[in-house]
Image: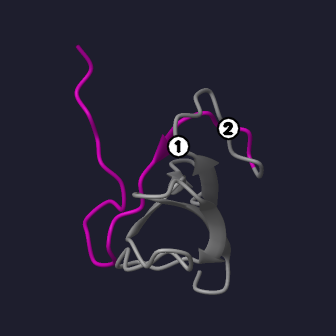
Amino acid sequence: MANRLTLYKCRSCNRTDRKPYDTDGNVSCNHCSSPMDSLETRYKCVRCGHIEWIEVGAIGKSCHKCGYRIFAKPRKEGTDRGFKILKAR
């Protein structure tokens, strides 16, 4: 995952740049050295386990491998299920 370039946006000057993915979120702007926020989020397909990178704010995305439409954010290794279950209202 470290070699994938992810889109980031600067908090102060609003410039965007593709940088290697950082799990800790310690990415700084080349222009003004301010912290940057990721504009893409990792999601894991509940059915097949494939990791998808989806732009923040996108809706209705589906897995490119199996076509399933429900994604969950990946959990740290060693958790029970590997995804979070939400109660339906």
Mark 1: give few (<14), some (14-19) or many (20+) Cα within 10 Å: few
Tell me the element at label 1. Answer: loop
Q: Is residue 82 magenta?
A: yes
Q: What residue is shown at x 41% (from left), y 58% (from top)?
A: 12
State which quarter of the image contains the C terminus: top left
N-term mark: 2 or 1: 1
Give the camera-side residue of 51 and 18: 18
* Image label count: 2
Could you tell me residue 10's position as x and y percent?
A: 48, 61
- Using the rendered view, name the quadrant where residue 7 is placed: bottom right
Badge 2 density bin: few <14, some 14–19, many ≥20, Cα 10 Å: some
The residue under label 1 is: 56
Compute the Cα span from label 2 to label 1: 14 Å
For residue 50, say whether it is visible.
Answer: no
Q: In front here: 89 or 25?
A: 25
Residue at point 58%, 28% (across, down): 59
Q: Which quadrant of the figure contains the N terminus?
A: bottom right
Q: Amino acid at mark 2?
A: Ser
Q: Horizontal and vertical percent for residue 49?
A: 57, 60
Q: Going 62% across and 56% down the picture, which residue do you hit?
A: 53
Residue stretch rendered in magenta on the structure: 66-89
Q: Are marks 2 and 1 in contact (CB under 8 Å)?
A: no
Q: Residue furthest top?
A: 89
Under circle 2, the secondary element is loop
Can you tell which of label 2 and label 1 is closer to the viewer? 1
Q: What residue does disc 2 label? A: 62
Q: Please, what is the three-letter code of the amino acid marked with disc 1?
A: Val
Magenta stretch: dominant secondary structure:
loop
Whole-percent x, y for residue 58 in the image: 59, 34
